[in-house]
Image: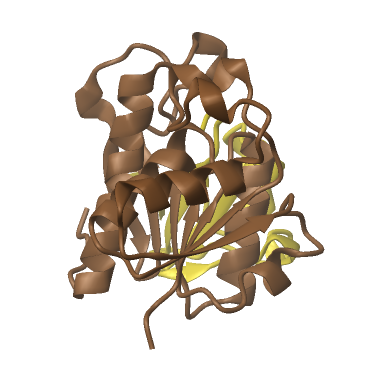
Chain colours: A yellow, B brown
Amino acid sequence: MVTINGESCDMSGKTVAEILEHLGYNLKRVAVEMNENIVPKAMYGETTAQDGDKIEIVRFVGGG
Amino acid sequence: MERSVAVCGLGGLGSNVAVMLARAGVKKLHIIDFDRVDMTNLDRQYYFRRNIGEYKTSALENIIHDIGADTEVIPHCARLDGENIADILKNDDIICECLDGADEKAELVNAVLEKFPEKYIISATGMAGLYSANNIRTRRITDKFYICGDGTSDMSEGIYSPRVMLCASHQANAVLRILKGESENE
């Protein structure tokens, strides 16, 4: 299991890109942190979540 | 040397963040925006009717001067994009993301996190609509990355001064706490 934004999810073995797509995020409007490290955008397709990983997805909405 | 705080975008968030930081005694503010003040900005941005037509950088520099704050203001009239972010922000220590578009926010935050892991970034997402003021909060994502706002409300719901200023206050407070050596826990 992988913890995503504090919730336990069955996403082990999936890449960050697959997780974002599965959860319905717009890839252009997020920042992703995994185990206290930022995942660079170029690495979304190559970074795979393992059991026990903690992922925080920040979604940006307009307004400022 | 004094630590430099960059305010990226001088709209409802950034103009208020910059004024609060100047009043709080921040010594060096790098203020960045490409735009000019117009009539529709006066509902929530720290400008006056007399500023209409002026560049926001120049108007805000004068406003901070009028407040009498002992702050060195470095105005930078430019639109931040993937090409110039690294060069414009290279000398700053703490960066406030105060842009309005979701794509631009994400681009700036990711660029800073990837290119400058030593810098702090305080971003904002979700301060629109007329939801509870209590939903606006500061979240620590990593040691160097903080995000303020409710995380969900967007421009299509209308945008009103109180929640924008609450969010700006969270950003300014996070900056002051970082300068003082405190860290945000949640």
**Image coordinates for residue B27, horizontal then vertical, percent:** 34, 70
- Foreground residue, B52 or B42? B52
Q: Where is B156 relative to A19, above or below?
A: above
The residue positioned 24% from the left and 52% from the top of the image is: B173
The residue positioned 32% from the left and 56% from the top of the image is: B22
**Image coordinates for residue B79, horizontal then vertical, percent:** 74, 49
B98 lies left or right of B120 = right
**Image coordinates for residue B33, horizontal then vertical, percent:** 64, 47
Q: In what quadrant of the picture does the N terminus of chain B appear? A: bottom left
- Foreground residue, A19 or B100? B100
The residue positioned 40% from the left and 53% from the top of the image is: B65
Q: Quadrant of residue A2?
A: bottom left
B114 lies left or right of B185 = right
Q: Is residue B155 visible?
A: yes
- Foreground residue, B40 or B54? B54
Q: Is residue A62 visible?
A: no
